[in-house]
Image (tube, rainbow, N blue to C red):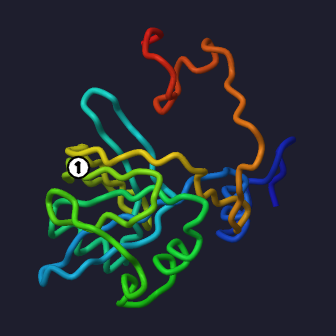
Amino acid sequence: MAQTPYGTEDFDSRQFRTAMGQFCTGVTVITTVDDDDRPVGFACQSFVALSLDPPLVLFCPMKTSRSWKAIERKGKFVVNVLSNRQQDVSAAFGAPGDDKFRNITWDPSPAGLPVIRHGLTWVECDIERVTDGGDHHIVIGRVQVLGEVLQDRPLLFYRGGYLSTEHPRVTPAQAELEHFLTWTGGDTWL
């Protein structure tokens, strides 16, 4: 096994997953409707805001995902950003099965796509581009509609489990935020 001063070049998928689990992410549910107008979706932690101008987001579904196939055919999707009160929603959409919406309350977006109630926010998007990403696709979506923003804490995923933010929010100095796309302060620094 080849060793470097800081790690190893010889690793398996379990070790890679453990290493990537050190990065805390938010949890989203990506939704659409299938060809029969039935709601479909999946839990997704590989989501990020990509660009302000134009307004783009990025998410990465597994190539084997049945929900992704419906999203691709529809050409539109909603990203539902979950609150820390929605662990049950995350669990429902993270598990295999066909009826993930059975106990989920949702409303239609302007395009008729599922917006899950009580999330922090949501965005409705058109698929802009799909690129290969190994065993996942890299999907870039152009935001068409922004949902209401609720004041609650985010649902976070860290080291294979959920994490809550219970400490007061600490805002770093403005200079430290120069490249943070999702900073909620003023935009005088742009």
**13 or 170, nearer to the observer:** 170
Coordinates of residue 190 in the picture (x, y in percent): 42, 13
Extreme-right residue of the structure: 5
Identify residue for label 1: 129
188 sits to left or right of 71: right
Instruction: Judge whether 91 appears above or below 97 on screen.
Output: above
Residue at image position (66%, 56%) is 20
Residue at image position (55%, 78%) is 91
Residue at image position (70%, 59%) is 158
Coordinates of residue 89 in the picture (x, y in percent): 50, 74
Coordinates of residue 18 in the picture (x, y in percent): 73, 63
165 sits to left or right of 32: right
Instruction: Judge whether 34 appears above or below 1 on screen.
Output: below
**39 or 9, nearer to the observer:** 39
110 sits to left or right of 189: left
Coordinates of residue 174 in the picture (x, y in percent): 61, 14
Secondary element under disc 1, as helix, strand or loop, is strand
Q: How many marks?
A: 1
**84 or 31, nearer to the observer:** 84
Which corner quadrant of the image does residue 159 belong to? bottom right
50 sits to left or right of 158: left
Residue at image position (25%, 52%) is 124
Instruction: Judge whether 52 appears above or below 136 on screen.
Output: above
Extreme-top residue of the structure: 188
Assign the N terminus to one quadrant of the image.
bottom right
Instruction: Judge whether 125 appears above or below 50 on screen.
Output: below
Which corner quadrant of the image does residue 99 belong to? bottom left
**10 Å crowding of disc 1: few (<14), some (14-19), many (20+):** few
- The amino acid beneath tag 1 is Arg
